[in-house]
Amino acid sequence: MNTTEAGTFWDGVYAKRPTAHAPRPNARLTETVAGLPPGDVLDLGCGDGGDALWLAGRGWRVTAVDISAVAVERLAALARAKGLGDRVTTARHDLGKAFPDGEFDLVCAHYLHTPFDLDRATVLRSAARALRPGGRLLVVDHGSTAPWSWNQDPGVHHPSPREVAADIGLDPATWPVERADAPRRIATGPDGQTAEVTDHVLVLHRTV
């Protein structure tokens, strides 16, 4: 993957959107985190920052990374404005080149899809290995194509959660699958348009 090309593409995607001053967290995150004690969390592909800000507001220490400089700069400014700057660390990071340092109680990867080459299995394998014992990897992928998606290819394959787990290829004795399903919900796009979409949800729980 050409980092400059990919970064420029995603900078353009976010620059075309007005800054989201109150970005919402993803529904699959809020239901997964409910009841978990706050700890250290890594947000892969943080985007507008709804997940990072929601987690920080509940006591989590967040490391939020994205290949888009526009996205991470906006998130850093929002975190400071909301008094959460001490709980949110942002960085522009190319996951195709290296994985962020650290150990975490939760790693989130929401809709980590790109038109550029990215070895997702390697990224997600690194994410699972970055978990502390007892930690969880939450992977939420598109299970359908929303009207506002940048990828409108009718032939696109949406891998099932079990397929994603198989691609990651980790020992299920250490990283058992805690959740693998395909719930539906009504989603709202960047311009306020709504549509029913399917999420592919995978949760791996590191036991040791």
Image: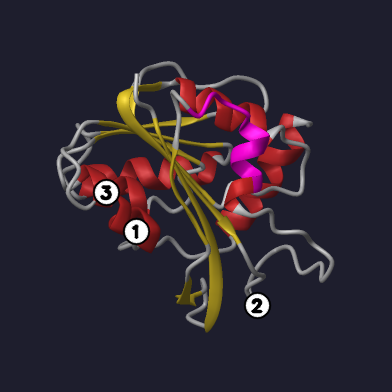
* Numbered mark located on residue 25 in the image: 1
Residue 87, horizontal then vertical, whole percent: 22, 34
* Numbered mark located on residue 147 in the image: 2
Q: Is residue 126 magenta?
A: no
> In this view of the protein, which residue sits in the foreground, 12 or 62?
62
Quarter of the rendering occupied by the N terminus = top right
Dots 3, 1 in contact, CB < 8 A: no
- Circle 1: element type: loop
Residue 167, horizontal then vertical, whole percent: 67, 36
Which residues make up the magenta segment? 163-172
Dots 1, 2 in contact, CB < 8 A: no
* Numbered mark located on residue 33 in the image: 3
- Circle 2: element type: loop
Rounded to the nearest angstrom, the CA distance separating label 1 from label 2 is 20 Å
Q: Main secondary structure of the magenta part?
A: helix
Callout 1 amino acid: Pro
10 Å neighbourhood of mark 3: few (<14), some, or many (≥20)?
Answer: some
Residue 196, horizontal then vertical, whole percent: 53, 81
Q: Nearer the viewer, mark 3 or mark 1?
A: 3
Q: Is residue 82 left or right of residue 185?
A: left
Callout 3 amino acid: Val
Residue 32, horizontal then vertical, whole percent: 31, 52
* N-terminal-most mark, 1 or 2: 1
